Amino acid sequence: MNQILSSYTASTTELKTSLNSILKQSEGDTVAILNHNTVSSYLVSPSVYEKLLNIADDYLLSKEVDKRLSQNVEPITVSLDEL
């Protein structure tokens, strides 16, 4: 069985019939959507989704920085005032 990574759960049937009540009960927290007692998806608030996108963007940016630093190119020193 898959691990449920949420404090709140709802079935697909509940999701279809009472989305607003699920959102209200979860108070903005993530909701695991279950189909036959197996997690089929997660319902996240806009703020959680935005945070996840920012984390993914930061991760990808750090990978690009690592890649460029490994190219042994002489770095250019810049002050914050120059930016």
Image (cartoon, rainbow, N blue to C red):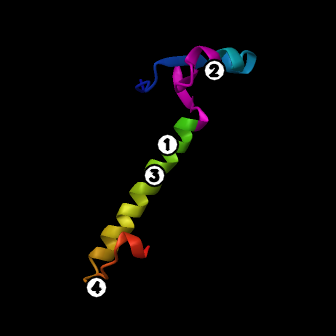
Can you tell which quarter of the image residue 12 is in?
top right
In the image: residue 61, left or right of residue 37:
left
Q: CA distance from mark 1 to mark 3?
A: 9 Å
> Secondary structure under badge 4?
loop
> Secondary structure under badge 1?
helix
The residue type indicated by label 3 comes to: Ala
The dot on residue 73 is 4
First in residue order: circle 1 vs circle 2: 2
Q: CA distance from mark 1 to mark 2?
A: 18 Å
The dot on residue 51 is 1
Question: What residue is pinned by disc 2?
Answer: 23
Residue 60 drawn at (x, y percent):
42, 60
Q: CA distance from mark 3 to mark 2?
A: 25 Å
Q: Residue at x 49, y 44 (%)?
A: 52
> Secondary structure under badge 2?
helix
Magenta span:
24-46
Relative to 9, say whether 30 is above or below.
below
Q: CA distance from mark 2 to mark 4?
A: 51 Å
The dot on residue 56 is 3
> Secondary structure under badge 3?
helix
